[in-house]
Amino acid sequence: MESLENLKFIPADDKRISYMGRIGWEDKSAPQIVFAGTSITLEFLGTRISAVIFNHRFYNVMELGVIVDGREYKVGFDTNYEKFNLTLAENLAYGRHRVTLFKRQDATHYFDFYGFAVDENAEILPAAPRPERRIECYGDSVSAGAVCEATDYTAKCDPENNEGQWDNAWHSYSMITARNLGAEINNIAQGGIAIFDGTGYYHAPDHIGMETAYNKVCYFPEAEGGFSDWDFSGYIPHIVIFAVGQNDQHNEKDGDPDISDPLFREKWKNRYKEIIRDLRTKYPDSQFILLLTVLMHDPEWDKAVDEIAGELNAEGDAKVSHFMFTRSGKATPGHPRLSEQYEMAEELTAYISKMGDAVWGQNK
């Protein structure tokens, strides 16, 4: 690892560092950063900052997002399975700086975060108060911001040479919506994921579904320590977005299921509802919004989601609703690009805003 000599090290558990996202805190000196969009922020007086991490790569290029005083960019690296010091910004004008490090990609990798390193004489400033509003999103590649920066391919199929270089969870509709509303967000999003294990595209050939991932911090067995459970009591959202269903028509082993088939439709809806009911026991006061995105899909999936919301309402749960984007399932054969992500965020922000301020006051 690059020497930290003549630098001031700020360990990961320092209270002046702020975090956002579902994070593994089993080792408080090296929290595990898994989910797309998870962020770490520090404010300081100084001229440079780096992050000490241990990266675990599975596939695709390795890039992390950085925001320095409102300016966003990315840093790439190829160091794996060793602790190293990643420069985030240097030669800054001396003064107050706010730096956010965030995970652009989903399970292409995860990393252990040990802390920041700044100038030896830098002054570390207190963390800003956390937002009082809280959102959680369960979704697939669209919620993870996959391929959103390939703007030359707007309304087209994805480019063939995609190795994750166009992924950016920060500009997914879910995270944009949270920022629009002044909320923090746990973005539980993974490309290719479906409801059922054995379906979708994630983690081939042993596909992992949301039924396994939704209650995990680490949801892939290859990680050091394997699967790890999430303590739901640590983060109670006011609003839960559930955006799964885009990949559920795919099953390599048994043939693609048909949502128009009554038997499969009932089976799929029942498992979907089981997950929602379990989350409702953990978040009894939260408002749940079920949706699918503008990525092209059979409208029967939207109808099935609408049926789920109606059936849960009929059970007496009035805090579940179905929201449809204006162009749900109709906008693009490839992943939504930046313009389409912002289009979705604008519509979803308006929908949540119409619920009024009371929706944010139910959880303390």
Image (tube, rainbow, N blue to C red):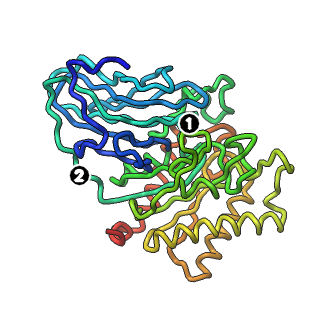
Residue lying at 39% horizontally and 36% vertically, measured from the top left: 113
Judged from the image, the secondary structure of the residue bearing numbered disc 2 is loop
How many numbered dots are placed on residues in this image?
2
| Quadrant of residue 336 within the rendered picture | top right
Q: Which mark is residue 88?
A: none
Q: CA distance from mark 1 to mark 2?
A: 32 Å
State the quadrant of the C terminus.
bottom left
Q: Which mark is residue 337?
A: 1
Residue 176 appears anywhere in the view:
yes
Instruction: Give the left or right position of residue 248, taking residue 111 as reference.
Output: right
Where residue 58 sits in the image (x, y, percent)?
60, 31
Instruction: Locate residue 175 relative to residue 320 in the image: left or right.
Output: left
Q: Which residue is mark 2?
A: 129
Residue 151 visible here: no
* Local SS, label 1: loop
Three-letter amino acid code at the position of disc 1: Arg
Write the residue at 27% across / 42% down. 17
Q: Quadrant of residue 223?
A: top right
How many C-alpha atoms fall within 10 Å of the one at disc 1: few (<14), some, or many (≥20)?
Answer: many
Relative depth, front residue between 172 and 332: 172
Residue at the right extreme, as displayed: 255
The percent coordinates of residue 210 (x first, y second) are 63, 54
Q: Are marks 1 and 2 in contact (CB under 8 Å)?
A: no
